[in-house]
Amino acid sequence: MSNGSIIDKCMEMWGTRCIASTVKLGIADFMSDAPKTAQEIAGSLKLNLDAVSRLLRALSTTNVINQIDSDHFQLTQVGLTLTRNHPLSTASFLSAATDPGYWSIFGSMEESIRTGRPSANRALGMDIWEYFAASPNEGKVFAQSMERVSLSVLYPILAAYRFEGKRIIDVGGYHGVFLKSILDLQLGGTDSVGILFDLETIISTAPPHPRVTFEAGDFFDRVPSGDMYLLKHIIHDWDDAACITILKNVAKSMEPYGKVCIVELLITHDSGLIPVIVDMNMMIAAGGRERTEDEYANLFTQSGLKLNRIIRTGTPMASGSVIDKCMDLWATRCMGSAVKLGIADALADGPKTAKTIAESLKLNEDAVFRLLRALSTTNVINRTDEDHFELTEVGMTLTTNHPMSAASFLNACTDPGYWSVFGAMEESIKTGGPSTHKALGMDIWEYYTKVPEEGKIFAKSMENFSLAMLYPLLASYRFEGKRIVDVGGSHGVFVKSILDKQLADTDSIGILFDLESVLSTAPPHPRVTLEAGDFFKQVPSGDLYLLKHIIHDWDDASSIKILSNVAKSMERNGKVCVVELLIADDSGTLPAFMDMNMMIAATGRERTEADYSSLFNKSGLKLNRIINTGAPVFIIEGVKDETFVHEE
């Protein structure tokens, strides 16, 4: 898969969610002092050994973990920031971003783009602040994450600006880290004092400071008097009307010649991904927004204040950091919304404005603009002028009619069921089984039966993925047989393509073998017979068997059962072609994170050459050869072992 493709972005999204599991389960902290084996980690933390091995293997294809020998893994410099005691720890931020409440909010983000309001009420039945009050553990993690973000930008802020004032009011300052740092590091030899102003429930747990007075209150009602006001990461939480109320209260209470310092991200023409993706986060979670210089000037003017100057602190996030990975995860989820809401298809024929798209699709214009603005910092959308946006070449693959469309794959990955399954992935690493029962109350196949709309999208995603792999398969291998059995072949695209493109002038026929419910909607083909059945019980006789993306769905015992049925029914000198991803030392992220997907969502796995050889040997088959197709998938060719005795 080409770097930067939509499938690639989905793997990175899953990768970031896997990284979060190392934080939530204590794996990163356990690895902080020295290289560890999967066995040591699983034994100490009471996790499933196979699941931990697969997680570490997957993460060793990223920049957070290195595999230093066949058994040992260690954290990289970026990986060390996942530990809770690191001075630049991102553990709480990543944990908060993937906790159940926040994960659910992002899973419902289409609601925000339709309405312009937060999706929290749809996802959680309440706003985000009510949820954190009702779920104090998640609220605590969120608060810790904000405190860590504050600490990470604290010293650049203090280096860039001299804070001066006799009475410094930290408005909504939580535990007062910012205020206390100013008093200690900049105003240590002065008589300046600080007032930490926040809700009673918050300041009641704030550590004391000899020069800071705590005052409880609501900044929508009033703020204490002072000559310097600090509002760090406050204004972005709220819409314009709420911000004007807060700032008016500041202006009313401000002493003559006083100042207010707002510390926020700023959206500019060259500010990159983080401010605009965090802006989407603020819209979805809280109803707030990140703003431009003009928008701050307007807020100040309406509040009795004047914009004096803007100071750039020089605190960009390093590329490849864990925060950066979170931004990429959110960006990919935003791409999912562009597919689900028809925005990508609306852009298929040329540049459009947010207004045109919103009116056509009955969406909120401001929300559509913010989404398009965010995605214009990625490789899927270009902003052609102030108002118009167009799809890039990669972005065109988000459209449903593109020949290499990834729309259904991204749609399936971000549908409610699948999104919930990944949100509960720690269950898989604890048990080694899928997290579907915890997330959905049933396995994924039952869920798709009960929620057929999502099942249909998933089936389409697999069909499109198969189509993308089809031509490399046909170009790299000559499929030959009189009776070609497509086992679990869905609508038979693979067997029909072989008959049409490789065996058109032969008398070969195909048997499409799948469940009755699947075959009932399969389009007919003059040389393909449909046969309903269950491959765990038996398969039709034939001399060439196709199993494309079947074996990876199942654990070893189930896979052996399927392959044994193939071997029993296979005619003499027959072959089986298993088409799957293959895990190797240099196979990269796609097979490794698809393997995590198979563990979390089903009971399956991606495998190595040695794994397939073992499966074949236990099924009455012999591994003959493996064909590299030049695409991500390989053809694992097996032949019948005539000496093998099958148990009845």
Image (cartoon, helix red, strand yellow):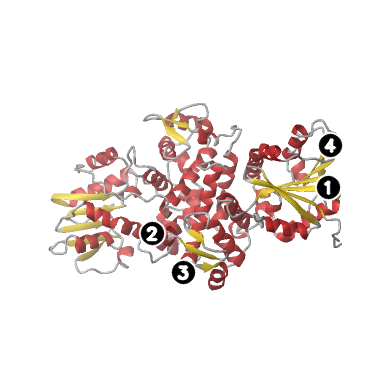
| Count of numbered circles in the view | 4
Viewer-nearest of labels 1 and 2? 1
Viewer-nearest of labels 4 and 2? 4
Residue labelled with disc 4: 508
Q: Secondary structure at mark 3?
A: loop
Disc 3 packing (10 Å; few <14; some 14–19; many ≥20)? few
Residue type (three-letter) at the residue carrying disc 1:
Gly
Residue type (three-letter) at the residue carrying disc 3:
Ala
Viewer-nearest of labels 2 and 3? 3
Circle nearer the N terminus (1, 4): 4
| Gap between marks 4 and 3 measured at Cα | 59 Å
Circle nearer the N terminus (4, 3): 3
Residue labelled with disc 2: 145
Answer yes or no: is residue 221 visible: no
| Gap between marks 2 and 3 measured at Cα | 26 Å
Circle nearer the N terminus (2, 3): 3
Residue beneath the point at 44% across and 64% down: 137
Left or right, residue 194 beside residue 73 = left
Residue labelled with disc 1: 574
Circle nearer the N terminus (4, 2): 2
| Gap between marks 4 and 2 measured at Cα | 62 Å
| Gap between marks 1 and 2 measured at Cα | 59 Å
Answer yes or no: is residue 646 visible: yes
Q: Position of residue 533 (x, y in %)?
A: 81, 48
> Does the CB distance between marks 4 and 2 fall below 8 Å?
no
Q: Nearer the viewer, residue 71 or 156?
A: 71
Residue type (three-letter) at the residue carrying disc 4:
Ser
Residue labelled with disc 3: 34
| Gap between marks 3 and 1 measured at Cα | 51 Å
